[in-house]
Image (tube, rainbow, N blue to C red):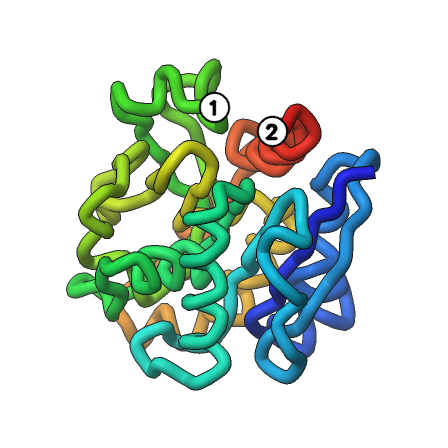
C-alpha cells in the first residue's frame, strides 16, 4: 500500500474536536482507503524521516500563522522544499498552502481585506484544464474556506491554477506534483457550519454578516473530491 504522511500543523477549536475529531481525522476520512496513512504532528514531533520515505505528503491547516516563522514551521518548510525537489506528490491545504509558497520563495501574510470564511465560489484558470489534480472539474465550484492569512506572492516557478474575487491565489502547482490550495477539501458541511458558529462573535466585530454566511454554507463536493484525486495520483505514481 502506498505510504502517505499527514503533517499536522495545529489543532482545531476544542468544541469541534470533541464533535468531529481533529484535522488529521478529516483528511484521513477523505483519502482513499487503499493508502497506508500516518500522522505526524510537526508542532511537537520530529519530521518523518526524509521526503523520499513517503509516496505522498499532505499538510493540514492550522490556527498558527506562517508569518510568525516558528522554528517547527520553518523546519517543516525546508522539508517540503526538499519534497518538491524530489517530486514526491504533495498537497498543502490552507496553512500548508501558505507554508509551501513561503518555503519555495513566495510570501505569506495577512490578507489586506481581512478574513475569508464560509462557502464561496472558486474559479479555475485555463492552466488548470490539463492539470493532473484539477482537470475535469467545472470551471467554477463551491469550496469551504476559513483564513486570515494568504499567499501574497507566489514562488517564481509556481503555476497559478485557481482564484476568486477575494483571494487571487486559491490554488497553485509547483513542479509536476506539488499543490497548494487555500480552501479546505477536508471540511464537511457540518464542520464549516461549526466553524462559522464558533467564529460568529469575531465575524460581527469584523463587520461580516455571520448569519448570512451560515445561511449560505452548502456542500462542496467538487472541492472535496481533491483528496480522492490526490490519492489516485499517489497510487498511479
Q: Earlier in the sequence, mark 1 or mark 2?
A: 1
* Residue 132: mark: 1
The image quarter in which residue 1 lies: top right
Which residue shows up at 33% across the image and 43% down it? 170
Q: In the drawing, what numbered circle is on residue 160?
A: none
Q: List x then y, in percent, for residue 27.
A: 67, 50
Question: Could you tell me if residue 211 is visible in this image?
Answer: no
In the image: residue 177, left or right of residue 22: left
Assess disc 1: are there few (<14), some (14-19) or many (≥20) residues with their C-alpha within 10 Å of its C-alpha.
some
At horizontal 54% and vertical 65% (from top left) the residue drawn is 197
Instruction: Answer with left or right where residue 230 lies relative to residue 182.
Output: right
Question: How far across and how far down the image is residue 39, in percent?
Answer: 73, 63
Q: Secondary structure at mark 1?
A: loop
- In screen coordinates, is 30 left or right of 157? right
Which residue is pictured at 75% across the width and 35% down the height? 32
Q: Secondary structure at mark 2?
A: helix
Residue under numbered circle 2:
233
Q: Are marks 1 and 2 in contact (CB under 8 Å)?
A: yes
Placement of 160 over or under 140, stated as above or below: below
Amino acid at each position: 500500500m502506498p505510504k502517505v504522511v499527514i503533517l499536522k500543523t495545529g489543532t482545531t477549536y476544542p468544541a469541534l474536536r470533541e464533535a468531529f475529531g481533529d484535522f488529521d481525522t478529516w483528511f484521513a476520512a477523505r483519502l482513499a482507503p487503499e493508502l497506508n496513512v500516518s500522522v505526524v504532528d510537526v508542532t511537537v514531533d520530529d519530521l518523518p524521516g526524509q521526503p523520499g520515505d513517503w509516496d505522498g505528503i499532505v499538510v493540514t491547516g492550522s490556527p498558527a500563522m506562517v508569518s510568525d516563522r516558528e522554528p517547527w514551521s520553518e523546519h517543516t518548510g525546508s522539508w517540503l522544499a526538499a519534497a518538491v525537489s524530489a517530486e514526491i506528490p504533495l498537497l498543502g491545504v490552507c496553512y500548508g498552502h501558505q507554508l509551501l509558497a513561503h518555503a519555495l520563495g513566495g510570501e505569506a501574510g495577512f490578507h489586506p481585506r481581512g478574513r475569508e470564511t464560509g462557502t464561496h465560489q472558486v474559479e479555475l484558470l485555463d492552466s488548470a484544464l490539463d492539470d493532473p489534480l484539477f482537470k475535469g472539474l467545472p470551471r467554477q465550484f463551491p469550496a469551504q474556506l476559513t483564513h486570515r492569512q494568504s499567499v501574497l506572492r507566489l514562488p517564481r516557478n509556481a503555476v497559478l491554477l485557481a482564484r476568486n474575487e477575494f483571494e487571487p491565489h486559491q490554488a497553485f502547482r509547483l513542479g509536476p506534483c506539488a499543490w497548494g490550495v487555500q480552501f479546505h477539501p477536508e471540511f464537511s458541511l457540518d464542520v464549516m457550519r461549526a466553524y462559522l458558529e464558533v467564529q460568529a462573535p469575531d465575524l460581527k466585530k469584523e463587520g461580516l454578516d455571520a448569519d448570512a454566511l451560515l445561511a449560505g454554507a452548502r456542500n462542496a463536493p467538487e472541492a472535496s473530491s481533491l483528496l480522492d484525486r490526490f490519492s489516485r495520483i499517489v497510487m498511479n505514481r
